[in-house]
Amino acid sequence: MANRLKWLVVLLGAALPVCAATQGSIAGMVKSADGTPQMGALVEVFAMGNLQPIVAFTSQAGSFQVASLAPGSYRLKVTAASFLPSLIENVVIRSGGRAIINVTLNTLAEAIRFLPPRQLSDQDQDDWKWILRSASNRPILRFDDDNGLILASSANNETRDSHGVKGKVAFVAGAQADGFGSAPDYGTSFDVQQALFSADTLSFDGRVGNGNGQPAGVIRTAYRHQFANGDTPTVAVTLRHTAPPGSITANALSSVAFTFSNTTNIGGLVDLSYGSEVQGVQFIRHISGIRPFATAGIHLRKDMVLEYRYATAEPASAFDRALDNPGGSDDEAVPMPRMSVVAFAPALERDRHQEISLSRKHGDTKFQAAFFFDRVSNLALTGSGDVSSIASDVIPDVSSDTFTFNGGNLETRGFRLVAEHTFSPELTALLDYAYGGAVTAPDWNSTGSWAEVREALHVENAHSVTAKLNGAIPESGTRWAASYKLISSNAVTPVDLFNASPGHADPFFSFVIRQPIPGGSFIPGHVEAVLNVRNLLAQGYRPFLSPDGRTLYLVQSARAVRGGLAFTF
Protein backbone atom coordinates (compact mmCIF):
# COMPACT_ATOMS: atom_id res chain seq x y z
CA MET A 1 0.00 0.00 0.00
CA ALA A 2 2.79 2.36 0.84
CA ASN A 3 4.44 1.70 -2.52
CA ARG A 4 1.19 2.53 -4.35
CA LEU A 5 0.91 5.89 -2.53
CA LYS A 6 4.52 6.64 -3.35
CA TRP A 7 3.97 6.13 -7.08
CA LEU A 8 0.73 8.20 -7.00
CA VAL A 9 2.55 11.16 -5.47
CA VAL A 10 5.28 10.89 -8.10
CA LEU A 11 2.73 10.83 -10.95
CA LEU A 12 0.83 13.85 -9.57
CA GLY A 13 4.05 15.82 -9.17
CA ALA A 14 4.97 15.14 -12.75
CA ALA A 15 1.50 16.05 -14.05
CA LEU A 16 1.28 19.46 -12.34
CA PRO A 17 4.03 21.13 -14.44
CA VAL A 18 2.49 19.65 -17.58
CA CYS A 19 -0.94 21.14 -16.71
CA ALA A 20 0.62 24.50 -15.94
CA ALA A 21 2.41 24.51 -19.25
CA THR A 22 -0.80 23.95 -21.17
CA GLN A 23 -2.34 27.26 -20.02
CA GLY A 24 -2.09 30.36 -22.26
CA SER A 25 -2.94 34.07 -22.14
CA ILE A 26 -4.29 36.97 -24.21
CA ALA A 27 -2.78 40.47 -24.03
CA GLY A 28 -2.98 43.63 -26.08
CA MET A 29 -3.75 47.33 -26.35
CA VAL A 30 -7.03 49.25 -26.78
CA LYS A 31 -6.79 52.58 -28.63
CA SER A 32 -9.07 55.03 -30.39
CA ALA A 33 -8.91 55.77 -34.11
CA ASP A 34 -6.38 58.58 -33.55
CA GLY A 35 -4.09 56.35 -31.47
CA THR A 36 -5.08 57.51 -27.98
CA PRO A 37 -4.93 54.69 -25.36
CA GLN A 38 -8.31 54.00 -23.74
CA MET A 39 -8.21 53.46 -19.98
CA GLY A 40 -11.00 51.48 -18.29
CA ALA A 41 -12.25 49.70 -21.41
CA LEU A 42 -14.09 46.44 -20.67
CA VAL A 43 -12.53 43.31 -22.22
CA GLU A 44 -14.67 40.15 -22.18
CA VAL A 45 -13.18 36.79 -23.22
CA PHE A 46 -15.66 34.06 -24.19
CA ALA A 47 -14.67 30.41 -24.60
CA MET A 48 -16.44 28.47 -27.31
CA GLY A 49 -19.69 27.08 -25.94
CA ASN A 50 -19.43 29.08 -22.70
CA LEU A 51 -21.66 32.12 -22.10
CA GLN A 52 -19.86 33.20 -18.92
CA PRO A 53 -17.00 35.55 -19.91
CA ILE A 54 -13.68 36.23 -18.26
CA VAL A 55 -13.61 39.97 -17.52
CA ALA A 56 -10.63 42.35 -17.60
CA PHE A 57 -10.15 46.13 -17.74
CA THR A 58 -7.49 48.15 -19.52
CA SER A 59 -4.86 50.02 -17.56
CA GLN A 60 -3.94 53.69 -17.79
CA ALA A 61 -1.75 52.88 -20.78
CA GLY A 62 -4.62 51.07 -22.49
CA SER A 63 -3.12 47.57 -22.03
CA PHE A 64 -4.88 44.44 -20.79
CA GLN A 65 -3.99 40.79 -20.06
CA VAL A 66 -6.11 37.69 -19.44
CA ALA A 67 -4.12 34.72 -18.10
CA SER A 68 -4.81 31.08 -17.20
CA LEU A 69 -6.64 30.22 -20.40
CA ALA A 70 -6.94 26.63 -21.55
CA PRO A 71 -5.93 25.91 -25.16
CA GLY A 72 -8.74 26.45 -27.62
CA SER A 73 -10.66 29.10 -29.58
CA TYR A 74 -11.95 32.27 -27.95
CA ARG A 75 -13.72 35.46 -28.95
CA LEU A 76 -13.16 38.91 -27.49
CA LYS A 77 -15.61 41.72 -26.96
CA VAL A 78 -14.23 45.18 -26.13
CA THR A 79 -16.53 48.01 -25.07
CA ALA A 80 -15.92 51.57 -23.86
CA ALA A 81 -17.98 54.68 -23.32
CA SER A 82 -18.65 56.78 -26.47
CA PHE A 83 -17.35 53.99 -28.74
CA LEU A 84 -18.92 51.19 -30.70
CA PRO A 85 -18.23 47.68 -29.32
CA SER A 86 -15.55 45.68 -31.10
CA LEU A 87 -15.82 41.88 -31.54
CA ILE A 88 -12.85 39.67 -32.43
CA GLU A 89 -13.62 36.09 -33.44
CA ASN A 90 -11.49 32.92 -33.55
CA VAL A 91 -8.66 33.86 -31.24
CA VAL A 92 -6.65 30.63 -30.99
CA ILE A 93 -4.71 29.90 -27.79
CA ARG A 94 -2.12 27.14 -28.06
CA SER A 95 -0.52 25.24 -25.23
CA GLY A 96 1.65 27.64 -23.28
CA GLY A 97 1.14 30.31 -25.95
CA ARG A 98 0.25 33.99 -25.77
CA ALA A 99 -1.96 35.86 -28.25
CA ILE A 100 -1.40 39.58 -28.81
CA ILE A 101 -4.63 41.37 -29.79
CA ASN A 102 -4.57 45.14 -30.43
CA VAL A 103 -8.04 46.67 -30.71
CA THR A 104 -9.01 50.00 -32.32
CA LEU A 105 -12.34 51.45 -31.20
CA ASN A 106 -14.37 53.68 -33.49
CA THR A 107 -17.19 56.09 -32.85
CA LEU A 108 -20.41 55.89 -34.80
CA ALA A 109 -19.35 58.72 -37.09
CA GLU A 110 -15.92 57.19 -37.72
CA ALA A 111 -17.49 53.89 -38.71
CA ILE A 112 -19.37 55.57 -41.58
CA ARG A 113 -17.17 55.66 -44.64
CA PHE A 114 -17.92 55.91 -48.34
CA LEU A 115 -16.80 52.77 -50.17
CA PRO A 116 -15.27 52.98 -53.65
CA PRO A 117 -17.40 51.66 -56.50
CA ARG A 118 -16.95 47.97 -57.24
CA GLN A 119 -14.97 47.36 -60.41
CA LEU A 120 -16.97 45.75 -63.20
CA SER A 121 -15.69 42.64 -64.89
CA ASP A 122 -15.31 44.33 -68.28
CA GLN A 123 -13.21 47.20 -66.98
CA ASP A 124 -9.53 47.47 -67.75
CA GLN A 125 -7.50 45.52 -65.24
CA ASP A 126 -4.59 47.96 -65.65
CA ASP A 127 -6.42 50.90 -64.06
CA TRP A 128 -4.16 50.66 -61.04
CA LYS A 129 -1.18 51.60 -63.22
CA TRP A 130 -2.80 54.86 -64.31
CA ILE A 131 -3.75 55.64 -60.73
CA LEU A 132 -0.12 55.34 -59.67
CA ARG A 133 1.05 57.41 -62.63
CA SER A 134 -1.44 60.20 -61.92
CA ALA A 135 -0.58 60.38 -58.21
CA SER A 136 1.57 63.33 -57.19
CA ASN A 137 5.17 62.55 -56.29
CA ARG A 138 5.90 64.06 -52.90
CA PRO A 139 9.16 63.62 -50.97
CA ILE A 140 9.03 61.80 -47.68
CA LEU A 141 11.87 63.82 -46.22
CA ARG A 142 12.14 67.60 -46.35
CA PHE A 143 15.49 69.31 -46.77
CA ASP A 144 16.58 72.47 -45.05
CA ASP A 145 18.23 74.62 -47.73
CA ASP A 146 20.02 76.74 -45.15
CA ASN A 147 22.27 74.11 -43.56
CA GLY A 148 21.67 70.96 -45.56
CA LEU A 149 20.23 68.99 -42.65
CA ILE A 150 17.56 66.40 -43.26
CA LEU A 151 14.43 67.04 -41.23
CA ALA A 152 11.84 64.34 -40.58
CA SER A 153 8.73 64.61 -38.44
CA SER A 154 6.36 62.02 -37.09
CA ALA A 155 2.90 62.00 -38.58
CA ASN A 156 1.50 60.50 -35.39
CA ASN A 157 2.20 63.64 -33.40
CA GLU A 158 0.57 65.83 -36.03
CA THR A 159 -2.48 63.59 -36.07
CA ARG A 160 -2.83 63.70 -32.34
CA ASP A 161 -2.46 67.47 -32.19
CA SER A 162 -5.08 67.95 -34.89
CA HIS A 163 -7.72 66.05 -32.94
CA GLY A 164 -9.43 68.17 -30.34
CA VAL A 165 -11.01 71.53 -29.85
CA LYS A 166 -9.24 74.79 -30.67
CA GLY A 167 -10.78 78.11 -29.81
CA LYS A 168 -10.10 81.82 -29.92
CA VAL A 169 -12.04 84.73 -28.47
CA ALA A 170 -11.21 88.39 -29.10
CA PHE A 171 -12.70 91.53 -27.61
CA VAL A 172 -12.41 94.43 -30.06
CA ALA A 173 -12.93 98.16 -29.56
CA GLY A 174 -12.94 100.80 -32.26
CA ALA A 175 -15.10 101.21 -35.34
CA GLN A 176 -13.93 99.76 -38.63
CA ALA A 177 -14.98 103.00 -40.40
CA ASP A 178 -15.42 101.49 -43.86
CA GLY A 179 -18.88 102.81 -44.56
CA PHE A 180 -22.21 101.06 -44.23
CA GLY A 181 -21.98 97.49 -42.98
CA SER A 182 -18.57 97.77 -41.36
CA ALA A 183 -17.82 96.24 -37.97
CA PRO A 184 -19.30 98.08 -34.94
CA ASP A 185 -17.23 100.19 -32.58
CA TYR A 186 -17.03 97.37 -30.04
CA GLY A 187 -17.75 93.68 -30.23
CA THR A 188 -16.57 90.12 -29.76
CA SER A 189 -15.14 87.76 -32.34
CA PHE A 190 -14.80 84.02 -31.82
CA ASP A 191 -13.50 80.97 -33.64
CA VAL A 192 -14.01 77.35 -32.53
CA GLN A 193 -12.64 74.38 -34.46
CA GLN A 194 -13.51 70.78 -33.66
CA ALA A 195 -11.64 67.90 -35.27
CA LEU A 196 -13.96 65.11 -36.38
CA PHE A 197 -13.09 61.60 -37.53
CA SER A 198 -9.50 61.38 -38.73
CA ALA A 199 -9.40 64.11 -41.41
CA ASP A 200 -12.44 66.35 -40.90
CA THR A 201 -12.84 69.71 -39.21
CA LEU A 202 -15.98 71.54 -38.15
CA SER A 203 -15.52 75.25 -37.45
CA PHE A 204 -17.85 77.85 -36.00
CA ASP A 205 -16.73 81.46 -36.06
CA GLY A 206 -18.15 84.93 -36.25
CA ARG A 207 -18.29 88.42 -34.85
CA VAL A 208 -21.06 90.07 -32.84
CA GLY A 209 -21.25 93.63 -31.62
CA ASN A 210 -23.42 96.54 -30.67
CA GLY A 211 -22.86 99.80 -32.48
CA ASN A 212 -24.75 102.86 -31.27
CA GLY A 213 -27.33 100.64 -29.57
CA GLN A 214 -27.96 98.54 -32.70
CA PRO A 215 -26.98 94.84 -32.69
CA ALA A 216 -24.97 93.50 -35.61
CA GLY A 217 -22.97 90.41 -36.34
CA VAL A 218 -21.88 87.65 -38.68
CA ILE A 219 -21.82 83.89 -38.01
CA ARG A 220 -20.11 81.30 -40.19
CA THR A 221 -20.18 77.50 -39.98
CA ALA A 222 -17.82 75.45 -42.14
CA TYR A 223 -17.12 71.76 -42.65
CA ARG A 224 -13.81 70.67 -44.17
CA HIS A 225 -12.56 67.22 -45.17
CA GLN A 226 -9.03 66.34 -46.22
CA PHE A 227 -8.59 63.39 -48.56
CA ALA A 228 -5.47 61.27 -48.74
CA ASN A 229 -4.53 62.75 -52.12
CA GLY A 230 -4.45 66.27 -50.67
CA ASP A 231 -7.87 67.52 -51.81
CA THR A 232 -9.51 69.71 -49.16
CA PRO A 233 -13.15 70.52 -49.96
CA THR A 234 -14.93 72.98 -47.66
CA VAL A 235 -18.62 73.80 -47.36
CA ALA A 236 -19.64 76.91 -45.40
CA VAL A 237 -22.80 78.82 -44.51
CA THR A 238 -22.57 82.48 -43.49
CA LEU A 239 -25.33 84.53 -41.87
CA ARG A 240 -25.00 88.29 -41.46
CA HIS A 241 -27.09 91.04 -39.91
CA THR A 242 -26.14 94.72 -40.01
CA ALA A 243 -27.71 97.50 -38.00
CA PRO A 244 -30.11 99.72 -39.99
CA PRO A 245 -28.80 103.13 -41.11
CA GLY A 246 -31.72 104.87 -39.42
CA SER A 247 -34.69 104.32 -37.18
CA ILE A 248 -36.46 102.02 -39.67
CA THR A 249 -35.67 98.46 -38.64
CA ALA A 250 -36.76 97.12 -42.03
CA ASN A 251 -33.73 98.84 -43.60
CA ALA A 252 -31.33 96.53 -41.76
CA LEU A 253 -29.13 94.40 -43.99
CA SER A 254 -29.50 90.63 -43.69
CA SER A 255 -27.66 88.17 -45.88
CA VAL A 256 -27.04 84.45 -46.21
CA ALA A 257 -24.24 82.90 -48.26
CA PHE A 258 -23.48 79.30 -49.20
CA THR A 259 -19.85 78.71 -50.12
CA PHE A 260 -18.03 75.72 -51.57
CA SER A 261 -14.26 75.68 -52.05
CA ASN A 262 -11.57 73.12 -52.70
CA THR A 263 -7.79 72.98 -52.90
CA THR A 264 -5.94 70.26 -54.80
CA ASN A 265 -2.66 69.45 -56.50
CA ILE A 266 -2.23 67.92 -59.95
CA GLY A 267 0.89 65.92 -60.60
CA GLY A 268 2.88 67.82 -58.02
CA LEU A 269 3.21 70.70 -60.49
CA VAL A 270 -0.12 72.54 -60.45
CA ASP A 271 -1.83 73.91 -57.33
CA LEU A 272 -5.55 74.57 -57.73
CA SER A 273 -7.88 76.47 -55.43
CA TYR A 274 -11.41 77.15 -56.59
CA GLY A 275 -14.95 77.61 -55.37
CA SER A 276 -18.10 79.65 -55.57
CA GLU A 277 -20.43 81.54 -53.27
CA VAL A 278 -24.18 81.94 -53.71
CA GLN A 279 -25.29 85.04 -51.85
CA GLY A 280 -28.70 86.43 -50.99
CA VAL A 281 -29.04 89.93 -49.53
CA GLN A 282 -32.13 91.55 -48.05
CA PHE A 283 -31.79 95.34 -47.93
CA ILE A 284 -34.89 97.36 -48.80
CA ARG A 285 -35.51 94.57 -51.33
CA HIS A 286 -34.02 91.16 -52.12
CA ILE A 287 -30.81 90.94 -54.20
CA SER A 288 -28.89 87.78 -55.07
CA GLY A 289 -25.58 87.04 -56.71
CA ILE A 290 -23.00 84.36 -57.49
CA ARG A 291 -19.33 84.96 -56.69
CA PRO A 292 -16.93 82.38 -58.20
CA PHE A 293 -13.21 82.44 -57.42
CA ALA A 294 -10.21 80.39 -58.51
CA THR A 295 -6.42 80.30 -58.37
CA ALA A 296 -4.11 78.10 -60.44
CA GLY A 297 -0.36 78.03 -59.85
CA ILE A 298 2.12 76.21 -62.10
CA HIS A 299 5.56 75.42 -60.65
CA LEU A 300 7.86 76.14 -63.59
CA ARG A 301 10.92 75.55 -61.45
CA LYS A 302 11.68 75.00 -57.82
CA ASP A 303 11.91 78.76 -57.26
CA MET A 304 9.44 80.03 -59.90
CA VAL A 305 5.63 79.95 -59.98
CA LEU A 306 3.27 81.16 -62.71
CA GLU A 307 -0.18 81.91 -61.28
CA TYR A 308 -3.62 82.88 -62.56
CA ARG A 309 -6.13 84.33 -60.12
CA TYR A 310 -9.81 85.15 -60.50
CA ALA A 311 -11.47 86.98 -57.61
CA THR A 312 -14.86 88.50 -56.93
CA ALA A 313 -14.17 90.13 -53.56
CA GLU A 314 -11.62 92.54 -52.13
CA PRO A 315 -9.01 91.08 -49.73
CA ALA A 316 -9.46 91.42 -45.99
CA SER A 317 -7.98 94.38 -44.14
CA ALA A 318 -4.69 94.14 -42.29
CA PHE A 319 -6.39 94.31 -38.89
CA ASP A 320 -8.88 91.53 -39.69
CA ARG A 321 -6.07 89.30 -40.93
CA ALA A 322 -3.96 90.02 -37.84
CA LEU A 323 -6.88 89.40 -35.48
CA ASP A 324 -8.64 86.48 -37.17
CA ASN A 325 -5.84 84.85 -39.14
CA PRO A 326 -2.28 85.69 -38.05
CA GLY A 327 -0.88 83.86 -41.06
CA GLY A 328 -2.22 86.53 -43.33
CA SER A 329 -4.30 84.26 -45.55
CA ASP A 330 -7.71 85.22 -46.79
CA ASP A 331 -8.93 81.65 -47.09
CA GLU A 332 -11.08 81.96 -44.00
CA ALA A 333 -12.16 85.57 -44.59
CA VAL A 334 -15.88 86.31 -44.88
CA PRO A 335 -16.41 89.02 -47.53
CA MET A 336 -18.96 91.67 -46.69
CA PRO A 337 -21.57 92.39 -49.38
CA ARG A 338 -20.89 95.98 -50.44
CA MET A 339 -24.23 97.77 -50.72
CA SER A 340 -25.08 101.26 -51.96
CA VAL A 341 -28.18 103.11 -53.13
CA VAL A 342 -29.06 105.12 -56.22
CA ALA A 343 -32.25 107.16 -55.86
CA PHE A 344 -33.30 104.98 -52.89
CA ALA A 345 -32.83 101.80 -54.97
CA PRO A 346 -30.32 99.32 -53.47
CA ALA A 347 -27.36 98.19 -55.58
CA LEU A 348 -24.93 95.35 -54.86
CA GLU A 349 -21.30 95.82 -55.84
CA ARG A 350 -20.22 93.14 -58.32
CA ASP A 351 -16.50 92.62 -58.78
CA ARG A 352 -14.46 90.75 -61.34
CA HIS A 353 -10.69 90.62 -61.03
CA GLN A 354 -8.32 88.64 -63.24
CA GLU A 355 -4.60 88.48 -62.63
CA ILE A 356 -1.57 86.74 -64.12
CA SER A 357 1.57 86.82 -61.99
CA LEU A 358 5.07 85.38 -62.07
CA SER A 359 6.89 84.90 -58.75
CA ARG A 360 10.49 83.95 -58.18
CA LYS A 361 12.68 83.48 -55.13
CA HIS A 362 16.39 84.23 -55.25
CA GLY A 363 18.10 83.61 -51.95
CA ASP A 364 16.48 85.82 -49.32
CA THR A 365 14.71 87.97 -51.91
CA LYS A 366 11.36 87.34 -53.58
CA PHE A 367 10.13 89.05 -56.74
CA GLN A 368 6.69 89.20 -58.30
CA ALA A 369 5.39 90.75 -61.51
CA ALA A 370 1.65 90.76 -62.20
CA PHE A 371 -0.81 92.07 -64.78
CA PHE A 372 -4.40 92.58 -63.67
CA PHE A 373 -7.75 93.40 -65.25
CA ASP A 374 -10.54 94.80 -63.05
CA ARG A 375 -14.21 95.42 -63.74
CA VAL A 376 -16.50 96.66 -60.97
CA SER A 377 -20.14 97.67 -61.24
CA ASN A 378 -21.91 99.72 -58.56
CA LEU A 379 -18.60 100.58 -56.93
CA ALA A 380 -19.17 101.34 -53.24
CA LEU A 381 -17.04 104.32 -52.21
CA THR A 382 -16.25 105.27 -48.63
CA GLY A 383 -16.99 108.79 -47.43
CA SER A 384 -16.70 110.73 -44.21
CA GLY A 385 -19.00 113.35 -42.80
CA ASP A 386 -22.22 113.98 -40.90
CA VAL A 387 -25.03 112.07 -42.59
CA SER A 388 -27.68 111.65 -39.93
CA SER A 389 -30.12 109.49 -41.88
CA ILE A 390 -30.32 107.58 -45.13
CA ALA A 391 -30.37 109.90 -48.12
CA SER A 392 -31.35 109.11 -51.68
CA ASP A 393 -27.79 108.09 -52.64
CA VAL A 394 -25.92 107.77 -49.33
CA ILE A 395 -26.02 105.07 -46.62
CA PRO A 396 -24.53 106.17 -43.28
CA ASP A 397 -22.72 103.87 -40.87
CA VAL A 398 -24.20 103.89 -37.37
CA SER A 399 -20.86 103.11 -35.65
CA SER A 400 -18.73 105.86 -37.22
CA ASP A 401 -18.97 109.11 -39.14
CA THR A 402 -18.47 107.32 -42.47
CA PHE A 403 -20.95 106.51 -45.21
CA THR A 404 -21.18 104.60 -48.49
CA PHE A 405 -21.72 106.29 -51.84
CA ASN A 406 -22.33 104.64 -55.22
CA GLY A 407 -19.42 105.60 -57.48
CA GLY A 408 -20.71 104.03 -60.68
CA ASN A 409 -18.61 101.57 -62.64
CA LEU A 410 -14.87 100.98 -62.81
CA GLU A 411 -13.01 99.21 -65.61
CA THR A 412 -9.24 99.29 -65.67
CA ARG A 413 -6.07 97.32 -66.22
CA GLY A 414 -2.56 97.66 -64.89
CA PHE A 415 0.50 95.91 -63.52
CA ARG A 416 2.24 95.37 -60.20
CA LEU A 417 5.89 94.84 -59.18
CA VAL A 418 6.77 93.49 -55.73
CA ALA A 419 10.19 92.95 -54.15
CA GLU A 420 10.56 91.43 -50.69
CA HIS A 421 13.82 90.88 -48.84
CA THR A 422 14.35 89.06 -45.56
CA PHE A 423 17.22 90.59 -43.62
CA SER A 424 16.75 88.27 -40.64
CA PRO A 425 13.99 86.15 -39.12
CA GLU A 426 12.97 89.29 -37.22
CA LEU A 427 12.94 91.82 -40.08
CA THR A 428 11.50 91.81 -43.60
CA ALA A 429 11.28 94.76 -45.99
CA LEU A 430 8.94 95.02 -48.96
CA LEU A 431 8.45 97.44 -51.84
CA ASP A 432 5.29 97.42 -53.98
CA TYR A 433 4.75 99.47 -57.13
CA ALA A 434 1.47 99.48 -59.07
CA TYR A 435 0.20 101.32 -62.11
CA GLY A 436 -3.42 101.32 -63.21
CA GLY A 437 -6.74 103.09 -63.13
CA ALA A 438 -8.31 104.61 -60.02
CA VAL A 439 -11.44 106.67 -59.41
CA THR A 440 -10.47 110.30 -58.79
CA ALA A 441 -12.54 113.16 -57.37
CA PRO A 442 -11.99 116.70 -58.69
CA ASP A 443 -12.19 119.86 -56.61
CA TRP A 444 -15.88 120.51 -55.89
CA ASN A 445 -16.77 124.01 -54.66
CA SER A 446 -20.49 124.22 -55.44
CA THR A 447 -23.54 122.27 -54.39
CA GLY A 448 -25.12 119.81 -56.77
CA SER A 449 -27.25 116.72 -56.89
CA TRP A 450 -25.93 113.29 -56.04
CA ALA A 451 -26.07 112.38 -59.73
CA GLU A 452 -23.83 115.36 -60.55
CA VAL A 453 -21.35 114.30 -57.90
CA ARG A 454 -21.27 110.81 -59.41
CA GLU A 455 -20.79 112.18 -62.93
CA ALA A 456 -17.86 114.30 -61.74
CA LEU A 457 -15.97 111.16 -60.74
CA HIS A 458 -13.77 109.69 -63.44
CA VAL A 459 -11.08 107.04 -63.85
CA GLU A 460 -7.45 108.11 -64.27
CA ASN A 461 -4.25 106.11 -64.54
CA ALA A 462 -2.11 106.64 -61.47
CA HIS A 463 1.06 105.38 -59.79
CA SER A 464 1.09 103.77 -56.37
CA VAL A 465 4.15 103.01 -54.22
CA THR A 466 4.07 101.04 -50.96
CA ALA A 467 6.93 100.61 -48.50
CA LYS A 468 6.35 98.00 -45.83
CA LEU A 469 8.30 96.58 -42.89
CA ASN A 470 7.47 93.43 -40.93
CA GLY A 471 9.36 92.71 -37.76
CA ALA A 472 9.46 90.93 -34.44
CA ILE A 473 11.12 91.45 -31.07
CA PRO A 474 12.15 88.01 -29.77
CA GLU A 475 12.71 89.18 -26.19
CA SER A 476 9.11 90.35 -25.73
CA GLY A 477 7.43 88.33 -28.47
CA THR A 478 6.17 91.51 -30.15
CA ARG A 479 5.23 91.33 -33.83
CA TRP A 480 4.62 94.47 -35.84
CA ALA A 481 4.01 95.67 -39.39
CA ALA A 482 4.20 99.25 -40.63
CA SER A 483 3.47 100.52 -44.13
CA TYR A 484 3.11 103.72 -46.10
CA LYS A 485 1.17 103.68 -49.36
CA LEU A 486 1.28 106.77 -51.56
CA ILE A 487 -0.72 107.45 -54.72
CA SER A 488 0.11 110.07 -57.34
CA SER A 489 -3.37 111.59 -57.86
CA ASN A 490 -6.51 112.63 -55.98
CA ALA A 491 -7.84 109.08 -56.04
CA VAL A 492 -10.62 107.82 -53.80
CA THR A 493 -9.92 104.15 -54.61
CA PRO A 494 -6.63 102.23 -54.53
CA VAL A 495 -4.79 101.68 -57.80
CA ASP A 496 -4.63 97.91 -57.27
CA LEU A 497 -8.00 97.32 -55.63
CA PHE A 498 -7.71 93.51 -55.39
CA ASN A 499 -4.06 93.23 -54.41
CA ALA A 500 -3.69 90.03 -52.36
CA SER A 501 0.10 89.77 -52.61
CA PRO A 502 2.44 90.35 -49.66
CA GLY A 503 2.50 94.00 -50.78
CA HIS A 504 -1.14 94.50 -49.81
CA ALA A 505 -1.43 97.38 -47.32
CA ASP A 506 -3.89 99.99 -46.16
CA PRO A 507 -3.57 103.44 -47.80
CA PHE A 508 -1.10 105.96 -46.39
CA PHE A 509 0.61 105.43 -43.01
CA SER A 510 -0.73 102.45 -41.09
CA PHE A 511 0.65 99.90 -38.65
CA VAL A 512 -0.36 96.77 -36.72
CA ILE A 513 1.15 95.57 -33.42
CA ARG A 514 0.63 92.18 -31.74
CA GLN A 515 1.91 91.87 -28.17
CA PRO A 516 1.68 88.65 -26.12
CA ILE A 517 0.59 89.21 -22.54
CA PRO A 518 1.76 86.88 -19.77
CA GLY A 519 -1.40 85.38 -18.33
CA GLY A 520 0.07 83.42 -15.49
CA SER A 521 -1.49 80.23 -14.20
CA PHE A 522 -4.96 81.75 -13.69
CA ILE A 523 -5.49 82.52 -17.41
CA PRO A 524 -5.39 79.40 -19.61
CA GLY A 525 -4.20 79.53 -23.18
CA HIS A 526 -2.43 82.37 -24.93
CA VAL A 527 -3.31 86.08 -24.59
CA GLU A 528 -2.37 88.77 -27.11
CA ALA A 529 -3.10 92.47 -27.45
CA VAL A 530 -3.68 93.73 -30.99
CA LEU A 531 -3.53 97.38 -32.08
CA ASN A 532 -4.19 98.72 -35.57
CA VAL A 533 -3.90 102.34 -36.65
CA ARG A 534 -4.99 103.07 -40.23
CA ASN A 535 -4.29 106.30 -42.10
CA LEU A 536 -2.85 107.92 -39.00
CA LEU A 537 -2.24 111.28 -40.72
CA ALA A 538 -5.79 111.42 -42.19
CA GLN A 539 -4.55 111.83 -45.76
CA GLY A 540 -6.46 111.48 -49.00
CA TYR A 541 -9.72 113.20 -47.95
CA ARG A 542 -11.41 114.80 -50.99
CA PRO A 543 -14.09 117.39 -49.99
CA PHE A 544 -17.33 118.06 -51.84
CA LEU A 545 -20.65 119.76 -51.09
CA SER A 546 -23.76 117.63 -50.69
CA PRO A 547 -27.13 118.74 -52.12
CA ASP A 548 -28.09 120.17 -48.71
CA GLY A 549 -24.87 122.23 -48.50
CA ARG A 550 -22.93 120.04 -46.06
CA THR A 551 -19.22 119.46 -46.52
CA LEU A 552 -18.54 115.77 -46.98
CA TYR A 553 -15.42 113.84 -47.97
CA LEU A 554 -14.60 110.89 -50.18
CA VAL A 555 -11.56 108.91 -49.08
CA GLN A 556 -9.71 105.72 -49.94
CA SER A 557 -9.59 104.67 -46.32
CA ALA A 558 -10.83 106.70 -43.36
CA ARG A 559 -8.67 107.10 -40.29
CA ALA A 560 -9.43 104.42 -37.74
CA VAL A 561 -7.93 103.13 -34.49
CA ARG A 562 -8.88 99.62 -33.41
CA GLY A 563 -7.59 97.40 -30.66
CA GLY A 564 -8.46 94.29 -28.77
CA LEU A 565 -7.47 91.32 -26.66
CA ALA A 566 -7.30 87.86 -28.24
CA PHE A 567 -7.47 84.69 -26.11
CA THR A 568 -6.34 81.47 -27.80
CA PHE A 569 -7.12 78.14 -26.14
Image (cartoon, grey):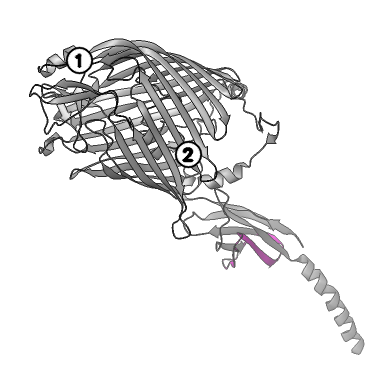
The answer to which of marks 1 and 2 sits earlier in the sequence is 1
Q: Residue 458 sits in which quadrant?
A: top left
Real-space Cα separation, disc 1 to disc 2, in angstroms? 40 Å
* For residue 171, above or below residue 269: below
Residue shown at 58%/22% (left/top)?
A: 134
Residue shown at 27%/11% (left/top)?
A: 459
**Can the viewer see residue 424 in this picture?**
yes
The image shows residue 61 at horizontal and vertical percentages of 61, 60
- Front position in the image: 402 or 254: 402
Q: From the image, tell me which residue sits under label 1.
A: 443
Amino acid carrying mark 1 in the image = Asp
Q: From the image, tell me which residue sits under label 2.
A: 479
Q: Residue 531 sits in which quadrant?
A: top left
Q: Residue 475 sits in which quadrant?
A: top right
The image shows residue 24 at horizontal and vertical percentages of 72, 63
Q: Secondary structure at mark 1?
A: loop
Is residue 64 inside the magenta stretch? yes
Is residue 405 inside the magenta stretch? no
- Could you tell whether 99 is left or right of 328 in the image? right
Amino acid carrying mark 2 in the image = Arg
User: Which residue of the protein is positioned furthest toward the left in this rendering?
Assistant: 548
Which region of the structure is painted magenta? Answer: 47-73
The image shows residue 75 at horizontal and vertical percentages of 61, 58
- Could you tell whether 503 is left or right of 284 in the image? right
* For residue 336, above or below residue 203: above
Residue shown at 66%/65% (left/top)?
A: 66
**Can the viewer see residue 93 in this picture?**
no
* For residue 93, above or below residue 299: below
